[in-house]
Image (tube, rainbow, N blue to C red):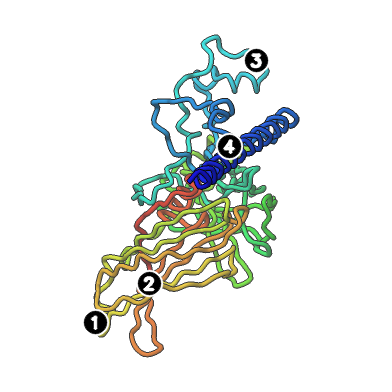
Amino acid sequence: MIFTTAAVLGATLGTASGILTLCGLSLICRSCKKGKLESGEDADPEKAKPSVLHSSEQFSVEKSTEPIQPRTLLKFPKIYKPKPSVTSSEVISYPDHASEKGGEPSPEGPSTEPDAGNQATDSSDTFTILRQDSKDETPCARDLTNGMTTSSSILHPKLHFSLTYYTDQNELHITVIEAEHLCVGSGCEGYVAGVLTFAAGQREAQTSSRRLTSHTRWEEGLVFSLPGGYEVEGEVALSLHSCDRFSQNTNLGVMRFKLVDVGMMSNADCWVDLQPPKQQDVQSAGELLLSISYLPAANRLGVVVMKARGLQSDKLKDSIDLSVKLALKHQTTKLKKKQTRRVKHKMNPVWNEMMMLEVPRELLSKSSLDLEVLNQAGPGEQESLGRCQLGLQASNTGLQHWQQMLDNPRKQIAMWHPLYD
């Protein structure tokens, strides 16, 4: 009994001492490990493990109640147009004008109103239908320094002449001296024609043909006989004509004066602007709606063939299968041809097709578009219903539309064009 009690007591004490030993060793190991970590942090604080406490020291967050606006990825450049060349008091007092002249700017300071001509044009796809009653029709253009031509830079051809009336011979002598501001293709020849119209009839005379350049001289005389003197009802028309290698005669401009003004103009040098010739009164074969735009950055000319109306029905009796053929020309050379799809069984067809053409901006002043409405009358047989032309060499709506495109780059501009056979 006594031996058993001693054995149990000894086992209990041994177990307790082992447990206490293990606890002591565990505490010693923990303390050693903690000491090593603290010594490592003191030696290299940059390699210390990040904690939640460090985040508040590294970052400072500011709260704002203002809404966050998205940033635009693309910004369209502003389009600057040439300032109007007028001499009103408002323009003269403008600070930029004063600085260019070397004078002092006006005391009122710069105007706070935005310049409408210097604001960027609207880049939306809205089509603008323009009025077709503009009187600004000029057939010649001069390129600006940046290569972009605008209608404000377009110049009329000018003719220099003098006239003398000889009373003893009853003759009117007109001396054609020179012409300038001519925009014609290379290899073209030209002459000046004079037409005298009065009660006795019509008389004509013309100069010899010369190679046309931007400045061409003739110094030749035109003689008209006036048996009844110049104080009669009548007029004289001087027109400048060009002929290319295909013998195509083009009227570049005309000027007119009354016979009763001969006495005032006699023995004087005259410089006159030649005006585009009046288009003959020809009934149109219908109308074609076009929208054009020019992208200067990409050198691309976009042409949208939209629709047609009022086409002559007598040419569409058997079949109606309509399309539009487009040709891009530089002077007299065709550079590109395109054609729309065909629309059947519709007297007022709608195409709404865009055609992109590559045209360098420096060639815009001498380029043009020829459009023709065609009807597929049969297999391999196409019949022309009418044509129209756009460009600075065109007239009426073709010239107006081209000028509006030059003045408003990157903007779609639409206009109806009459079709002629």
Which one is in front in this view, the residue at disc 1 or the one at disc 3? Answer: 3
Which one is in front in this view, the residue at disc 2 or the one at disc 4? Answer: 4
Q: Nearer the viewer, residue 11 or 394?
A: 11
Residue 61: x and y in percent read 50, 27
Badge number at residue 103: 3
Query: Rounded to the nearest whole Å, what is the CA distance between mark 1 and mark 3?
Result: 72 Å
Residue 128 visible (yes or no): yes
Tell whether 248 sits left or right of 283. Answer: right
Badge number at residue 20: 4
Name which residue type carries label 3.
Gly
Element on which disc 1 rests: loop
Badge number at residue 195: none
The disc, 1 or 3, on the residue closer to the chain's N-terminal end is 3
Q: Is residue 94 above or below residue 191?
A: above
Question: In the image, what residue occupies the spot 58% across and 57% down?
Answer: 366
Q: Quadrant of residue 339?
A: bottom left
Q: Which residue is tagged 1?
A: 317
The disc, 4 or 1, on the residue closer to the chain's N-terminal end is 4
Name which residue type carries label 4.
Leu
The disc, 2 or 3, on the residue closer to the chain's N-terminal end is 3
Element on which disc 2 rests: strand
Q: Quadrant of residue 185?
A: bottom right
Pointer 4 with pointer 3, Cβ within 8 A = no
Which one is in front in this view, the residue at disc 4 or the one at disc 1? Answer: 4
Element on which disc 3 rests: loop
Residue 67: x and y in percent read 39, 31
